[in-house]
Image: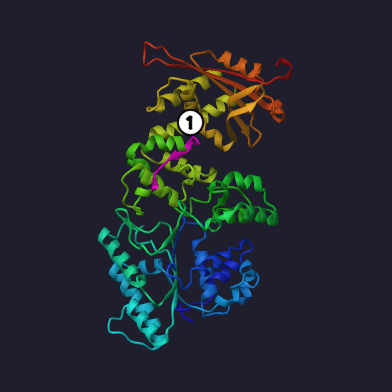
């Protein structure tokens, strides 16, 4: 038993004893299928706080010959699988947390020296072998030649070099060549499981470690259920610890992969532990990683961020991203990086990115307020003011704030109700924290343009839009077509909102918005 070679199970035991531990042990079953086959290389990239290190420690505790972990795993789901006993504490494991080697390293050569001094020495001491080259690959080949022993590598934070600006591009290449020298055509390897935030670095269109199967937030198959907490797992935790699942869902749900809704494990654990609903990102990763990209305003990212905060999705092409936190050439690259960092969700079907939930949205707003985009800070405040003006039924202010939103969206030109709807949608992005938004809601005798269904005690809103018309026409349409049907639960707190826009066709710079707001009254309709 050593620190790197066949470590004990202490790290996983600490997670297992946590009252909020969630059993993810069936990941082991998936990894068992990769042992001693040609394709035995797996790299899992997930954001911080998504349980990467817990999983790495679990695999180490299960496979390592350096401990007896039956008392841990006999009570977990993996114990019910056919090959559970076959692999339990039956492999030589080399566990490397690359952050440890880089803490005091000023160069990649320093890191390689630390690995040689620590890991190689431990192997030489255990196996009593020597090699003239004294490198990790040469020692492992010598061990295999003399003993036929093979190894499972578990490497945590493998990409830390690629995330640190102190390392040059040439040093990054040196680091990747170093990893490649360990893994390429190596008969002494049974399995490699690497975790990090970024997918494997590409140069051009080629991966630097092409032998790896990559599991990412962009392409999670077939590990979807292990990329975070599933909704079923979160419900079980809420039931066990008497927490309101619906409120927790409104804060932290939003990473959708196929039919699965995934949650950030750290946020769930902290929320339940603290018995409150709040953002837990602030103290775990600085929003500077967002702010830098906002300030760049590359490739029209400004308009994209406005649309994202408004609750819209944006189609991206993630394939050009070079899997590097210092190299980005387009808006698509920046948004792809934000998916890997967990700030954006990714829809596999539509190729759209989106802000996943209230917790992350709060981080966007903090970053924007501290960025050089004063106009975006103004847009946030404008949206908050618009929401309060609507609740107060202040028609003039609502019209004013809608017009301000239109002026703030320089790329949008009005020529139809659809364009007006886009502006209204963006103007009301602050409503996302209070409402569920429904577009073209089928109710009564037609389709209401926008319905805002409250999550709290705020009034429900039925919004009808008209172009080149007056707001009274919009209100009358709500009444005539009875769009309020089906919203009986909100009859005592329901506002009808008509918003219109008129434009002088002879004056491009002329535009004016109007608003009419009425409180729903059963006897009047």
Residue 90 pos. (x, y %): 53, 79
Decide which of 222, 247 is in the foreground and name it: 222
Circle 1 residues within 10 Å: few <14, some 14–19, many ≥20: many
Snapshot quadrant of residue 239: bottom right
- Residue 106 seen in the figure: no
Decide which of 78, 462 is in the foreground and name it: 78
What span is colored magenta in the figure? 309-318
Decide which of 287, 245 is in the foreground and name it: 245
Residue at 44% from the left image edge and 77% from the top image edge: 151
Residue situated furthest right in the rendering = 523
Residue at 37% from the left image edge and 85% from the top image edge: 145
Snapshot quadrant of residue 89: bottom right
Instruction: Check the image and report above or below for 499 versus 42.
Output: above
Here the colouring is rainbow
Magenta part mainly helix, strand or loop? Answer: loop
Mark 1: which secondary structure? helix
| Residue of label 1 | 426
């Amino acid at each position: 038993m050593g620190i790197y070679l066949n470590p004990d199970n202490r790290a996983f035991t600490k997670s297992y004893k946590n009252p909020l531990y969630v059993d993810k042990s069936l990941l082991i079953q998936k990894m068992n299928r990769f042992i001693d086959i040609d394709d035995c290389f797996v790299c899992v990239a997930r954001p911080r706080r998504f349980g990467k290190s817990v999983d790495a420690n679990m695999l180490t505790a299960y496979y390592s010959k350096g401990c007896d972990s039956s008392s841990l795993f006999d009570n977990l789901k993996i114990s019910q699988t056919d090959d559970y006993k076959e692999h339990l504490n039956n492999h030589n494991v080399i566990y490397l947390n690359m952050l440890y080697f880089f803490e005091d390293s000023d160069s990649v050569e320093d890191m390689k020296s630390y690995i040689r001094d620590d890991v190689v020495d431990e192997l030489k001491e255990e196996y009593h072998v020597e090699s003239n080259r004294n490198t990790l690959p040469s020692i492992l080949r010598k061990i295999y030649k003399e003993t036929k022993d093979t190894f499972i590598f578990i490497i945590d934070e493998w990409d830390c070099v690629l995330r640190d600006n102190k390392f040059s591009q040439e040093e990054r290449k040196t680091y990747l060549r170093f990893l490649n020298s360990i893994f390429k055509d190596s008969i002494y390897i049974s399995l490699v499981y690497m975790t990090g935030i970024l997918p494997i670095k590409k140069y051009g269109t080629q991966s630097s470690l092409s032998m790896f199967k990559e599991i990412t937030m962009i392409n999670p198959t077939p590990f979807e259920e292990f990329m975070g907490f599933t909704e079923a797992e979160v419900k079980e935790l809420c039931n066990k610890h008497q927490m309101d699942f619906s409120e927790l869902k409104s804060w932290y749900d939003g990473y959708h992969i196929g039919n699965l809704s995934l949650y950030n494990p750290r946020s769930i654990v902290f929320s339940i532990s603290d018995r409150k609903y709040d953002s837990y990102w602030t103290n775990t990763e600085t929003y500077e990683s967002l702010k830098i990209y906002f300030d760049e305003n590359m490739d029209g990212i400004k308009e994209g961020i406005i649309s994202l905060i408004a609750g819209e999705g944006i189609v991206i092409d993630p394939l050009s991203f070079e899997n590097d936190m210092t190299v980005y050439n387009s808006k698509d690259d920046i948004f792809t990086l934000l998916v890997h960092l967990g700030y954006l969700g990714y829809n596999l079907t539509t190729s759209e990115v989106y802000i996943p939930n209230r917790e992350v949205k709060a981080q966007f707003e903090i970053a924007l307020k501290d960025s050089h985009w004063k106009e975006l800070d103004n847009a946030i405040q404008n949206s908050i003011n618009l929401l309060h003006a609507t609740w107060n039924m202040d028609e003039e202010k609502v019209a004013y704030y809608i017009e301000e939103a239109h002026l703030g969206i320089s790329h949008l030109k009005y020529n139809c109700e659809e364009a007006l709807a886009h502006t209204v949608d963006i103007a009301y992005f602050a409503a996302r924290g209070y409402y569920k938004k429904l577009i073209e809601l089928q109710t009564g005798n037609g389709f209401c343009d926008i319905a805002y269904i409250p999550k709290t005690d705020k009034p429900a809103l039925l919004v009808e839009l008209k172009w080149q018309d007056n707001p009274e026409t919009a209100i009358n349409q709500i009444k005539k077509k009875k769009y309020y049907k089906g919203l009986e639960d909100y009859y005592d707190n329901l506002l009808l909102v008509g918003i219109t826009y008129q434009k002088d066709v002879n004056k491009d710079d002329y535009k004016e918005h109007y608003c009419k707001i009425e409180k729903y009254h059963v006897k009047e309709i």
